[in-house]
Amino acid sequence: MANLDSPRLLGWPVVEKQAFRKLGPSDPAKAHTEIMPLGRLLIAMGLVLLAAGLLVTFAGRLPLHLGRLPGDIRIHGRNFGFYFPLTTCILLSLTLTLVLWLLRR
Protein backbone atom coordinates (compact mmCIF):
# COMPACT_ATOMS: atom_id res chain seq x y z
CA MET A 1 0.00 0.00 0.00
CA ALA A 2 1.36 3.42 -1.00
CA ASN A 3 2.05 6.09 1.56
CA LEU A 4 -0.56 8.82 0.98
CA ASP A 5 1.67 11.48 2.55
CA SER A 6 4.46 10.85 0.05
CA PRO A 7 5.77 14.08 -1.54
CA ARG A 8 5.63 12.44 -4.97
CA LEU A 9 1.88 11.82 -4.63
CA LEU A 10 1.28 15.41 -3.49
CA GLY A 11 3.22 16.82 -6.47
CA TRP A 12 5.96 18.37 -4.37
CA PRO A 13 9.55 18.41 -5.64
CA VAL A 14 11.64 15.61 -4.22
CA VAL A 15 15.24 16.30 -3.29
CA GLU A 16 17.44 13.36 -4.06
CA LYS A 17 20.35 12.39 -1.86
CA GLN A 18 22.78 13.53 -4.57
CA ALA A 19 21.72 17.14 -3.98
CA PHE A 20 23.19 17.02 -0.47
CA ARG A 21 26.76 16.52 -1.59
CA LYS A 22 29.55 18.25 0.25
CA LEU A 23 30.00 21.89 -0.70
CA GLY A 24 33.47 23.29 -1.17
CA PRO A 25 36.68 21.72 -2.34
CA SER A 26 37.07 17.99 -2.06
CA ASP A 27 40.68 18.42 -0.93
CA PRO A 28 41.21 20.98 1.89
CA ALA A 29 44.73 21.61 0.61
CA LYS A 30 43.21 23.13 -2.57
CA ALA A 31 40.88 25.49 -0.71
CA HIS A 32 43.20 28.47 -1.03
CA THR A 33 43.42 28.16 -4.81
CA GLU A 34 39.64 28.20 -5.19
CA ILE A 35 39.31 31.36 -3.09
CA MET A 36 42.14 33.25 -4.85
CA PRO A 37 39.94 34.89 -7.53
CA LEU A 38 37.76 36.41 -4.81
CA GLY A 39 40.82 37.88 -3.11
CA ARG A 40 42.07 39.34 -6.38
CA LEU A 41 38.66 40.83 -7.08
CA LEU A 42 38.56 42.47 -3.63
CA ILE A 43 42.05 43.91 -4.12
CA ALA A 44 41.10 45.27 -7.56
CA MET A 45 37.92 46.82 -6.17
CA GLY A 46 39.93 48.42 -3.37
CA LEU A 47 42.36 49.93 -5.86
CA VAL A 48 39.49 51.29 -7.94
CA LEU A 49 37.95 52.88 -4.84
CA LEU A 50 41.33 54.35 -3.87
CA ALA A 51 41.77 55.84 -7.35
CA ALA A 52 38.23 57.26 -7.27
CA GLY A 53 38.86 58.77 -3.84
CA LEU A 54 42.09 60.40 -5.00
CA LEU A 55 40.37 61.73 -8.11
CA VAL A 56 37.56 63.27 -6.08
CA THR A 57 40.01 64.72 -3.57
CA PHE A 58 42.33 66.31 -6.11
CA ALA A 59 39.85 67.02 -8.94
CA GLY A 60 39.90 70.76 -8.27
CA ARG A 61 43.65 70.91 -8.86
CA LEU A 62 43.58 69.14 -12.21
CA PRO A 63 44.12 71.28 -15.30
CA LEU A 64 41.17 69.49 -16.93
CA HIS A 65 37.98 70.70 -15.29
CA LEU A 66 35.50 67.85 -15.70
CA GLY A 67 31.97 69.17 -15.90
CA ARG A 68 33.07 72.52 -17.35
CA LEU A 69 34.43 71.41 -20.72
CA PRO A 70 33.52 72.95 -24.06
CA GLY A 71 30.54 71.01 -25.34
CA ASP A 72 28.90 70.59 -21.94
CA ILE A 73 25.38 71.98 -22.27
CA ARG A 74 24.37 74.72 -19.80
CA ILE A 75 21.14 76.66 -20.05
CA HIS A 76 20.31 79.25 -17.37
CA GLY A 77 17.09 81.20 -17.07
CA ARG A 78 15.65 83.38 -14.35
CA ASN A 79 14.11 80.51 -12.39
CA PHE A 80 15.44 77.60 -14.37
CA GLY A 81 18.73 75.86 -14.90
CA PHE A 82 19.61 72.88 -17.07
CA TYR A 83 22.99 71.21 -17.24
CA PHE A 84 24.06 68.17 -19.26
CA PRO A 85 27.81 67.35 -19.31
CA LEU A 86 27.89 65.86 -22.82
CA THR A 87 31.64 66.24 -23.46
CA THR A 88 32.49 65.06 -19.95
CA CYS A 89 30.34 61.94 -20.42
CA ILE A 90 32.01 61.13 -23.74
CA LEU A 91 35.49 61.69 -22.29
CA LEU A 92 34.80 59.50 -19.24
CA SER A 93 33.25 56.79 -21.44
CA LEU A 94 36.31 56.70 -23.71
CA THR A 95 38.67 56.62 -20.74
CA LEU A 96 36.82 53.78 -19.00
CA THR A 97 36.56 51.85 -22.27
CA LEU A 98 40.32 52.15 -22.80
CA VAL A 99 41.13 51.11 -19.22
CA LEU A 100 38.82 48.09 -19.32
CA TRP A 101 40.14 47.09 -22.75
CA LEU A 102 43.71 47.20 -21.42
CA LEU A 103 42.77 45.19 -18.33
CA ARG A 104 41.16 42.42 -20.42
CA ARG A 105 44.23 41.97 -22.66
Image: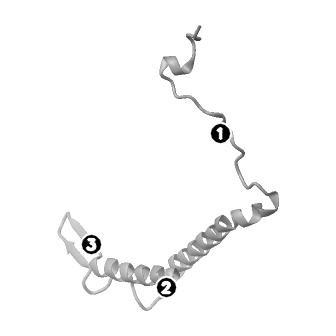
**Which residue is more in the foreground, 34 or 89?**
34
Residue 74, how many percent across, how many down? 23, 76
State left or right for residue 86 relative to residue 58.
Answer: left
Residue 50, how many percent across, how many down? 60, 75
Task: Identify the residue under disc 1.
Answer: 18
Distance between the alpha carbons at the discs numbered 3 and 1: 57 Å
Pointer 2 or 3: first along the chain: 3
Distance between the alpha carbons at the discs numbered 2 and 1: 43 Å
Q: Amino acid at mark 1?
A: Gln
Task: Identify the residue under disc 2.
Answer: 102
Residue at the location (79% across, 57% down)? 27
Residue at the location (23% across, 68% down)? 82
Direction bottom: furthest residue? 63
Distance between the alpha carbons at the discs numbered 2 and 3: 29 Å
Q: Secondary structure at mark 1?
A: helix
Q: Quadrant of residue 30?
A: bottom right
